[in-house]
Amino acid sequence: MRNLVIIGSGCAGNTAAIYAARANLQPLVIAGHEPGGQLSLTTLVENFPGFPEGIDGPVLVDNMKKQAEKFGAEYQHGTVIEADLSRRPFRLNVDGDWVETSVLIVASGASARWLGLESEKKLVGHGVSSCATCDGFFYRDKKIMVIGGGDSAMEEANFLTRFGSEVALVHRRNEFRASKIMLDRARANPKIKFIAPAVVDDIFDADKGYVTAVKLRRPDTGETWIRDVDGFFVAIGHIPNTAVFRGQIELDEEGYIVSKGGAKTSVPGVFHAGDVQDRNYRQAITAAGAGCMAAIEAERFLELEHLPA
Ligand code: NAP
């Protein structure tokens, strides 16, 4: 039986763990299926305050973990495969073993949706990215490609024109899911070249360890061709990691946790932190801030319970 379990070991979960550990709550962090979260998929992080030279994403997140461990947080490998939040203590099934906890912080994040190509997997963090804000800066005067037809793809393509010599926007259909205003803005940007309908068959060059070109195919005619690219940005949506909480915590139509103010969820004693609730900012620093908020709220929640009536 634990005071506090934190699900997720990205920026949000680790920051919650630092704060909770320093408040003597001896939190248990369940690392999740992507230990380290989205930061573990990037290379240099230049926008996290306090690191004028930048810091490697995996190093930053590992430093947070060490910092939390120094104050008594425990980490457990594994994924929550089932949860019972109907009564307290809450019960979590971590790969077959049940853990009970008085209070819970859900910081399980949202995973970027990827195309699913082998070469894409090998080149993530080496020319393949799911975050223009994080990585756009590295492609100054380079050839950039953005995949997707939604608002994120339009926004990222527009943003990336600040850096790239050209931005090719590749979408699998002729129709776009993006809102008219975002689509019109992207279409009016002379640096953005629309390529649609087209799908990505392969990304080169995994052997070299960086992106050099992409093989594209027209789905209607089957015609294929190669286009030189330096930076490849996938903007085809995110999937919040909330499947085990469906029907227990209030989620929106896409599965993001609905906030009930501060870090509160619809279940008293369960708090949210980071991308699992935030579809908007999705930054390391905002996730860290949200982790801090969740830990403070969890601590207050426990404190109030133990006050004499
Ligand atoms: P989205 O609206 O779900 O769009 C995803 C896009 O990716 C779609 O065009 C989809 O194509 C494409 N796609 C999905 N899977 C694919 C695959 N396997 N291969 C190729 N293409 C694939 O996601 P989003 O753009 O991230 O937006 C999510 C939400 O956030 C939306 O509600 C959006 O309005 C909102 N948002 C708002 C703003 C803003 O207002 N500033 C900015 C960003 C996001 P199909 O259309 O063919 O399915």
Image (cartoon, rainbow, N blue to C red):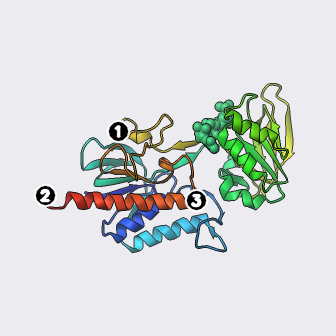
Q: What's under tag 1, amino acid-wise? A: Gln
- Categorize mark 2 by other alpha carbons within 10 Å: few (<14), some (14-19), many (20+): few
Residue 140 appears left or right of 303: right
Residue 268 place in picture, x, y as percent: 30, 47
Q: Which residue is mark 2?
A: 309
Residue 228 appears left or right of 297: right
Which of these two is toward me, 173 or 224?
A: 173
Dot label at residue 248: 1
Q: What's under tag 3, amino acid-wise? A: Leu
Q: Which residue is mark 3?
A: 39
Distance between mark 3 and mark 1 Cα atoms: 28 Å
N-term-proximal mark, 1 vs 2 = 1
Residue 279 place in picture, x, y as percent: 54, 46
Residue 235 versus residue 286 in the image, above or below: above
Kind of element beneath mark 2: loop
Distance between mark 3 and mark 2 Cα atoms: 44 Å
Which of these two is toward me, 245 or 209?
A: 245
Is residue 11 at least partly visible in the picture? Answer: no
Q: What's under tag 2, amino acid-wise? A: Ala
Residue 138 place in picture, x, y as percent: 75, 61
Residue at screen point 47% across, 67% down: 65
